[in-house]
Image (cartoon, coloured by chain):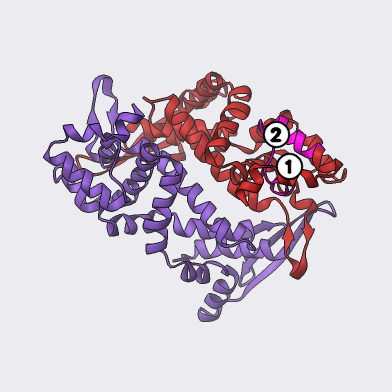
Chain colours: A red, B purple
Amino acid sequence: MKVLRLLRIQELTYDKKDKRLASAIKNMVGSRPLNLSLYRLAFRHASASKEIKSGVKISNERLEYLGDAVLGTVVAEYLFQKFPYRDEGFLTETRSRIVNRESLNQVGQKIGLPKIVETEMDGKVPYSFKSLYGDTLEALIGAVYLDRGYYFCRRFVYERLIIPFFDLDNIITTTTNFKSKIIEWSQRDNKEVDFVLKSVAGSQRFKEFTVELTISGSSFSEGKGSTKKKAEQEAAKIACEKLHLIL
Amino acid sequence: MKVLRLLRIQELTYDKKDKRLASAIKNMVGSRPLNLSLYRLAFRHASASKEIKSGVKISNERLEYLGDAVLGTVVAEYLFQKFPYRDEGFLTETRSRIVNRESLNQVGQKIGLPKIVETEMDGKVPYSFKSLYGDTLEALIGAVYLDRGYYFCRRFVYERLIIPFFDLDNIITTTTNFKSKIIEWSQRDNKEVDFVLKSVAGSQRFKEFTVELTISGSSFSEGKGSTKKKAEQEAAKIACEKLHLIL
């Protein structure tokens, strides 16, 4: 089966529409698909799912679940290798700023998903559905993974998604400091923000600090961490989220 | 460098302790390590981190971050392949029942991490630290991934972690039905539980249902989903969590 695919025997059976799809995928992914049906499934959003026997619906949601995981790993390793001296808190935070609904949606649009999705869904694109292209991008990553394997998929994500579309320097500057963000906010809005160390648990070797963030004297959020600084960052981060200060 | 590693030149420099560690890893992972220092790092929990110059601490937390992602992907694919007809909600839920702090902790202990960690940390194991072996297991997975690549690591996770230690049938039976769980609870505790459809948003093609779960008439939790059933499951799941009914 694999040999047949590598010989691209399947391509002999392509009709016009298949050929167009295969070449669109080649432009997007960097190589012709071996198993076209995987990609066709990736472009089938739940809102246009086909119902097969016994009520089972066929849509890209399973591929999206798989692609989401693969993308998470690939980006995790990318940052791990790129920032050998940063701690896991920084890596996790930076990753979540790369892999999120909104940014994936934008990237999905930039690499040309709208046109393919429209063709595949016979024009019935649910424009109202916000994360359509982000979901589809994840499903596409899942399809590439199954079709061409992990390392090909990793190169696809690095070279065609992360490097062209994410300005890491910019992401990092805006990532890091939630504490300064909340303090800026307090100065702008004339509020009093304080960080209060509530408790230190654990042994001498391994401590857990709990810090409470107060606004004008009343408790607003709480953070935990292995250092006071980390606990403060965590509390500040939660506060930033509550106040919608994070882009 | 890679050739040197494959020739295992490094092994010539092993001292007694290294040899013992390498053979323990071979038993655990299924193959001798190519880069022993990665594994040594994996066994160095934050509570025993070494401080190097400029205050940077060396511990397994970065490897844990990487291993967590890799494990997530490997388990995601395992379930994806094993259950071709189940939807992504089921797959996500089942995955989170495999990959969680407690189960990883147990598996980490079963594959023999305590002894290695104790040796590597010169006996200074922080027994009080609850997720020590789960964290270390994730870090080990990260080390295996970096040392031997994705496919080796995937086989390690399948053959040495999932298949021997997880009873999937059992996980699935207890996973699925939160609605029946909450109803059982209501009968046992003589409460009245109701599911109330609050709203249906979206277009004709793609709907979002919102269901409210009430206990004895007052609102207790809310769930959303693309079908009424999914929204009910979600509301029931949140309620089960609030009531600590999930094992």
* Residue at the (59%, 65%) spot, across then down: B236
Residue under pointer 2: A108
Of pointers 2 and 1, the one earlier in the residue sequence: 2
**Chain under numbered label 2:** A
Q: Are marks 2 and 1 in contact (CB under 8 Å)?
A: yes
* Residue at the (40%, 41%) spot, across then down: B145
- Residue A24 colored in magenta in the image: yes
Image quarter of residue B197: bottom right
Q: Is residue A127 above or below residue B166?
A: above
Q: Secondary structure at mark 2?
A: helix
Mark 2 vs mark 1: tell me if same chain: yes
Residue under pointer 1: A132
Q: Position of residue A113 (x, y in %)?
A: 75, 35
Image quarter of residue B200: bottom right
Per the rendered image, the range of residues in magenta is A20-40
- Residue A73 colored in magenta in the image: no
Q: Position of residue A118 (x, y in %)?
A: 83, 40
Q: Position of residue A212 (x, y in %)?
A: 40, 38
Q: Is residue A72 above or below residue B177?
A: above
Other residues around mark 2 within 10 Å, as few (<14) / some (14–19) / many (≥20):
many
